[in-house]
Image: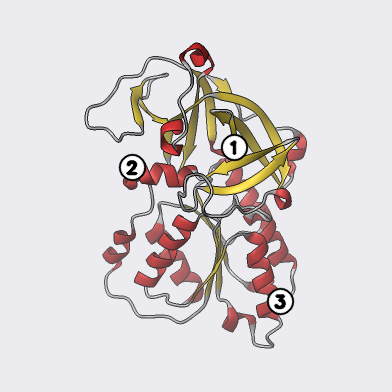
Amino acid sequence: MADVKKRDAEAENSTSMLQILEFTISARHFGINVAKVDALMPKEPVMPMPNANPYVEGVFKPRSKIMTLINLAAYLGLPEMREQDSERNIYIVTNFNKNQSAFHVHTVEAIHNIPINLIEKPDVSIYGGTSGLATGIARIADRLVTIIDFEKILMDISPTTGINITDIDRLGVRANSVKPILIAEDSQMLEQIIVEALHRAGYANVIVCMNGQEAWDTLEKLKQSGKPIEECVSCVITDIEMPLMDGHSLIQLIRADEVLKVLPVIIFSSLINQEMRQKGEAVGATAQLSKPEITELVHLIDKHIL
């Protein structure tokens, strides 16, 4: 396996850059956050599985662990690679949401360090009408690279890998709360799931923002209302990887503001590894959780605002 975790000093120390692995499918350019990538592998034999999801090619065993291979061209509704070009097939091995999987792509182009504020939020109708499939679009040289929501793909194929809203019901009878909670989440699907989960947990007053920049603009407006900030927003929940402004940069702005710095800020992300946890601590996150842990998120909100 080829290691893709090597970062240069600029990307390592910056909270305003996103490192993207660019790959292609049928000559179209896509991207994935390098933080979600474990390795790159050349094509190797795969064992088909009976009654598997139509987008699952099968399983293979690159080392000591059996791994599922997802055909990304099939999922996106794009043409398969021609047989004469098949030697260029690449497997991208990912690790996020405490799940390791592999995605079959056609070529891998390069790794790019892209300023977050240059990554734009795409229209939800992009790529076959699959709502929210693209989380961002970046211009690299003379081409547009679409950053794909790999969490959505995994949840579509295997719902057990994502947030289970019914876990909230295990918390039992809960009192309702009108305390406002602000969420910064760029995935339309995950935003809807998190909001529904909080509503089930009794938190009915949820302010939704599609990225860190929108969250910051909202906080600035709330701060100017003249009310105590705790009455306008009692807790902030933020993803890390978002267009325009990432979660770490959002927390830095909150902690540097004399009025907003008192707010509890919880990172709720698929990218909570050791490196990201250290970055979250450095910028002043109150707590950090991986996205499947929805009941733990509710417990943290209870702890900090009730």
**Mark closer to the chain start, 1 or 2:** 1
Identify which residue, 295 or 129, lies in the foreground: 129
Which amino acid type corresponds to the residue marked 3 in the rendered image?
Answer: Val
Q: Where residue 48 sits: x, y (%)?
A: 29, 22
Give the residue displayed 64% in from the left and 46% down from the top: 137
> What residue would you read off at disc 2?
158
Residue type at mark 1 is Gly
Q: CA distance from mark 3 to mark 2?
A: 43 Å
Q: Along the horizontal axis of the image, is 205 left or right of 241?
A: left
Residue at screen point 52% across, 24% down: 106
Residue identified by numbered label 3: 259
Mark 3 / mark 2, whichever is N-terminal: 2
Residue 153 vertical position relative to residue 106 in the rendered view, above or below: below
Query: Where residue 276 appears, x then y in whole percent?
Result: 60, 45
Question: Which residue type carries mark 2?
Answer: Ser
Residue at figure coordinates x 38%, y 49% from the top left: 162
Front tag of 1 and 3: 1
Asked if residue 99 lies left or right of residue 84, the reply is left
Would you say residue 37 is visible in this rendering? yes
Q: Position of residue 66 (x, y in %)?
A: 35, 25
Disc 1 and disc 3 in contact, CB within 8 angstroms:
no
CA gap between label 1 and label 3 equals: 37 Å
**Residue 264 position (above or below residue 159):** below
Q: Which mark is residue 31?
A: 1
| Label whose residue precedes the other's in the sequence (1 or 3) | 1
User: Foreground mark, 1 or 2?
Assistant: 1
